[in-house]
Amino acid sequence: MKESEDMPKKAALHGKLEIMTPDEVAAFLRVSRRTINHLVAAEAIPFVRIGKRVIRFKRHAVTKWLREQSTQKEGR
């Protein structure tokens, strides 16, 4: 049973899940869940809200968002 419970986390790390939970996105991006919560609150990362409390992320949208992030601010 333990192996099947770990499968979604392992799949998320390897980019195999199309729809990811906040915890899976945090693991995928190697950041804390708190960081994901802040990004969602600021609407800085693409997400889908299902109902009032459930948040999900499309893997390809997160990957695209990550590629578009700049490491330096322009004008500095």
Image (cartoon, rainbow, N blue to C red):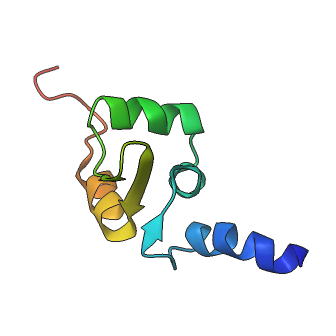
Left of 27 or right of it: where is 75?
Answer: left
What residue lies at 68% left-to-right and 71% top-to-bottom?
Answer: 10
Residue 59: percent from left, percent from top: 39, 67
| Outermost right residue | 1
| Outermost top residue | 76
What residue lies at 42% left-to-right and 29% top-to-bottom?
Answer: 38
| Outermost left residue | 75
Q: What number of labels is visible?
A: 0
Q: Nearer the viewer, residue 22 or 51?
A: 51
Left of 39 or right of it: where is 31?
Answer: right
Image quarter hosting the N terminus: bottom right
What residue lies at 61% left-to-right and 75% top-to-bottom?
Answer: 11
Residue 71: percent from left, percent from top: 31, 38
Residue 50 sits in which quadrant?
A: bottom left
Residue 62 sits in which quadrant?
A: bottom left
Residue 41: percent from left, percent from top: 34, 30
8 vs 71: above or below: below
Q: Nearer the viewer, residue 73 or 64?
A: 64
Q: Nearer the viewer, residue 2 or 71?
A: 2
Left of 24 or right of it: where is 6?
Answer: right
Residue 46: percent from left, percent from top: 28, 51
76 vs 18: above or below: above
Residue 40 sits in which quadrant?
A: top left
What residue lies at 51% left-to-right and 57% top-to-bottom?
Answer: 21
Image quarter hosting the C terminus: top left
